Image (cartoon, grey):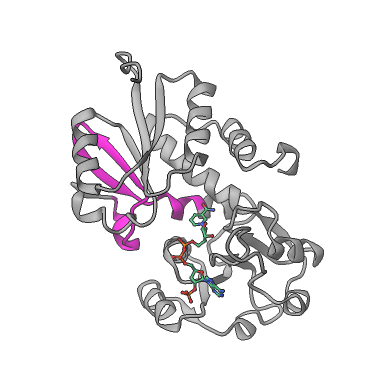
């Protein structure tokens, strides 16, 4: 049996069907770097309502929420951050003495990752995908004043996001008119090692449309250097890998749970070690 939690130690964690260690690695590294009396456990959850009752009763301070629970969790919470309410998905829960509030830090993570390179306001962004991540990013970008063009295989899903965010929809070729966009974001799952490692852009189209004035962000983080980022680098574009969004969304969670600024470098080193990447690739 595990040792009981020492008095004064605050517990955070995550809830998913298939727990992974990335969040734990980043949060624990952050607690260590600031010497905070916090710890973090990734929980495998099959009974969502029961898990939240337990979180209230046990005083678990913060919980990350993964698929498939990002929408299902909403009616079980006491309050929603207005941003999460607009997006319609929650990836973070903060427990204030039994009062559970839902947030969406994926959106904030994407904004912070892009704004390390350039302002989002007034950027012309082509956003590939219309899944959960794309929806959060479309809301974040348009709320911050970017103009967004959505490209997705399933037109109806793109249409729903376009209506909710005042974005437009185009084909890949029309969206990527040379000189017509500043930022390209891949929010499809294309590029992932274990799913489909292909680039969402054919090589010839990438060469014809991406140049040094363009910023390319791939939110896929496994591998860190996706095929899209390899093509973009070769065309002289600036690139942001998916680990950066992952890091910034965890940093926002860290701030919500602890009230302290997140130690980004320590968390980034832990993320890269867990992903098997060298810090030198930063
Ligand atoms: P999702 O809801 O399942 O959406 C998947 C998206 O990929 C859909 O738009 C889907 O198009 C598109 N897609 C899948 N296969 C495709 C193909 N062969 N050709 C064209 N489009 C294809 O997934 P999600 O939760 O949005 O996540 C998307 C990716 O983002 C995943 O790789 C995930 O790991 C990553 N992610 C990263 C972060 C981060 O912090 N870096 C955060 C969240 C997610 P249809 O709609 O046409 O099916």
The answer to whether residue 216 is left or right of residue 63 is: right
Give me the residue at 35% from left, 73% from top. Answer: 164
Rendering coords of residue 89 (x, y %)? 33, 58
Is 55 placed left or right of 127 in the picture?
Answer: left
Magenta run includes residue 40: no
Work out whether 231 lies above or below 99: below
| Residue 172 in view, yes or no | yes
Name the outermost residue toward the top: 7
**Is residue 100 rendered magenta in the image?**
yes
Rendered residue at 43%/29% (across/down):
260
Residue 17, image x and y in percent? 37, 49
The N terminus appears in which quarter of the rendering?
top left
| Residue 33 picture quarter | top right
Left or right for 143, reference 173: left
| Image quarter of the C terminus | top right
Whether residue 259 appears in this view of the structure is no
User: In the picture shown, does residue 10 fall above or below 181?
Assistant: above
Q: Residue at x 45, y 83 (%)?
A: 155
Residue at left offset 60%, top offset 53%: 221
Location of residue 57 by image quarter: top left
Write the start and end of the magenta stretch as one range: 81-109
Q: Position of residue 48 (x, y in %)?
A: 25, 48
Residue projecting furthest to the front: 1
Is 44 placed left or right of 188 in the picture? left
15 or 280: nearer the viewer? 15
Which residue occupies the foreground of this view, 62 or 260?
62
């Amino acid at each position: 049996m595990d040792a009981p939690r020492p008095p004064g130690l605050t517990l955070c964690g995550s809830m998913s069907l298939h727990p992974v260690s990335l969040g734990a690695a980043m949060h624990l590294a952050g607690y260590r770097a600031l010497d905070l009396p916090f710890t973090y456990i990734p929980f495998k959850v099959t009974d969502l309502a029961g898990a939240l009752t337990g979180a209230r009763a046990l005083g678990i301070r913060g919980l990350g929420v993964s698929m498939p629970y990002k929408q299902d969790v909403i009616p079980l919470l006491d309050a929603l951050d207005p941003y999460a309410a607009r997006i319609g998905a929650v990836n973070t829960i903060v427990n204030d003495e039994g009062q559970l509030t839902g947030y969406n830090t994926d959106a904030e993570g994407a904004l912070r990752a892009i704004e390390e390179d350039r302002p989002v306001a007034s950027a012309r962004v082509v956003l590939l995908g219309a899944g959960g991540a794309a929806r959060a990013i479309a809301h974040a970008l348009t709320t911050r004043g970017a103009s967004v063009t959505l490209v997705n295989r399933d037109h109806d899903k793109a249409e729903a996001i376009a209506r909710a965010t005042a974005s437009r929809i185009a084909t890949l070729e029309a969206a990527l008119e040379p000189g017509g966009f500043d930022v390209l974001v891949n929010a499809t799952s294309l590029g992932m090692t274990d799913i489909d490692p292909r680039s969402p852009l054919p090589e010839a189209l990438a060469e014809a449309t991406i140049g040094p004035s363009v910023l390319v962000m791939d939110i896929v983080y496994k591998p860190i250097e996706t095929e899209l980022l390899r093509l973009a680098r070769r065309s002289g574009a600036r690139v942001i890998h998916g680990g950066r969004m992952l890091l910034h969304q965890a940093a926002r969670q860290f701030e919500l749970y602890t009230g302290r600024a997140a130690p980004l470098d320590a968390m980034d080193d832990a993320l890269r070690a867990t992903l098997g990447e060298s810090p030198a690739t930063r």
